[in-house]
Image (cartoon, rainbow, N blue to C red):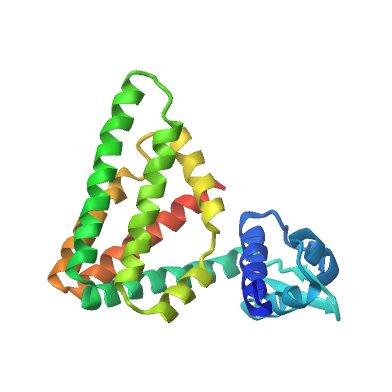
Amino acid sequence: MMTAGTLADQAYRQVRTAIATGELAPGEKVTERGMAERLSISPTPVREALRRLELDGLIERIGPRTVLVASIRDAAIDDLAEVEVGLRGLVARFAARHATADQLDALDAILDRADDLLILLKERNAQERPVDRHLAELFDTMQQFNDTVSACAHNPVLVRMLEQSRVFSRPRRRELLLRRVAADENFGMERYTSHRALVRALRAGDSATAERIALEDAQGGLAALREAL
């Protein structure tokens, strides 16, 4: 059973994503009850989520139960993106200190699977055959890689903060990635090679290099998703 706190976190992420993607436009009026109906939850967790969004600068309160999506959406989203990028770097720094040998081997195995999928995708593209299923499998594989890096940090509080700070929800991120790849089959390839470098840094216990690689990858990834909008 989901607690009120869990529901508030969920509402916070969903409303924040709607603002980030423009689904909720600047100046749009939002009521607690209306948003609760939209999310199919009670008003109480929505009220808590809106309080947090107000502190983030993403909404402006105009009444006891009514808010407006702030007109400074782009600047506020940039602030959120900066937080997410910083946390991604911090996770990598902790991972370099605490990753186990089994976890590092798992990361290499995940990237081996991703390499196989990339070869298959290139072959199917050359043959002009459908690639949707294989592309989705590659995205899932890379998400598993990211989740495993987070697990390597051995810091549940930090990982939870990262999940709560994400500018785009996982489904929205997937949608935008598919959109970018549909427009450019080579999208993201220049950043893909950084994953091997990250694993090497983790194996070496080089926290500074691991953090730098993760920061650069996160910055590039978020910038690409913003462009996909």
Q: Give the residue displayed 29% in from the left and 71% down from the top.
A: 152
Q: Give the residue displayed 41% in from the left and 46% down from the top.
A: 139
Left or right of 37 on screen, residue 218: left
Counting from the top left corner in percent of width and height, residue 191 is at: 30, 51
Residue 90 figure quarter: bottom left
Counting from the top left corner in percent of width and height, residue 151 is at: 34, 69
Image mark count: 0
Residue 49 figure quarter: bottom right
Q: Give the residue displayed 22% in from the left and 52% down from the top.
A: 109
Q: Nearer the viewer, residue 153 or 227?
A: 153
Left or right of 3 on screen, residue 91: left
Counting from the top left corner in percent of width and height, residue 220 is at: 38, 56
Q: Nearer the viewer, residue 74 or 3?
A: 3
Q: Is residue 29 visible?
A: no
200 lies above or below 97: above
The residue sitting at the left extreme is 204
Q: Quadrant of the N terminus?
A: bottom right
112 lies above or below 73: above
Left or right of 59 on screen, residue 110: left
